Amino acid sequence: MSTNDDLARLAAVIEGRKPANGGDPEKSYVARLLHKGPDAFLKKIGEEATEAVMAAKDLDHGGDPQKLVNETADLWFHCMIALAHYNLSPADVIAELTRREGLSGLEEKAMRKVLQREAAPGPHTD
């Protein structure tokens, strides 16, 4: 099974746990987070990102590599909940990563800044 299939299967489970799809906040952690709204799952993303950073830094001092894997899994999982809330999927993220493949990271970042500037309201000087 491919990673895309694994992510799609997990995304389908998360989708099924949405309260609108019958997910019960009393019985499901995912349904509870989605029922509480963005503040709940966005807070978890921040917490998990911090824990992943700490686990990575610990690796420089003899930490357990599995801890970084575990924290990254937690981070990805909570990001997937956010994606589901906003009717997006891991496939959308993979498509964006694929679009960026072969682009220089520095060039891609510069292009995003140009596009953001062009999209911003207000006077533009060329």
Image: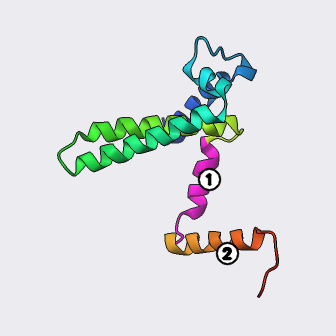
> Quick one: quadrant of the C terminus?
bottom right
The residue carrying mark 2 is 114
Q: Does 122 sit above or below residue 75?
A: below
Check disc 1: other Cα within 10 Å, few if <14, some if 14-19, many if 20+: few
Instruction: Please state the extent of the stretch shown in magenta in the rendering.
Output: 90-104
Horizontal side of residue 53 vs 43, given as left or right = left
- Quick one: label 1 or label 2, which is nearer the N terminus? 1
Mark 1 residue element: helix
Marks 1, 2: nearer the viewer:
2
The three-letter code of the residue at mark 2 reads: Val
Inspect the magenta stretch and tell me whether residue 28 lies in it.
Answer: no
- The answer to whether residue 17 is visible is yes
Check disc 2: other Cα within 10 Å, few if <14, some if 14-19, many if 20+: few
x, y percent for residue 47? 46, 38
Residue farthest along the top direction in this orientation: 26
The residue sitting at 56% across, 30% down in the picture is: 10
Disc assigned to residue 95: 1
x, y percent for residue 121? 81, 69
x, y percent for residue 98? 57, 57
The three-letter code of the residue at mark 1 reads: Ala
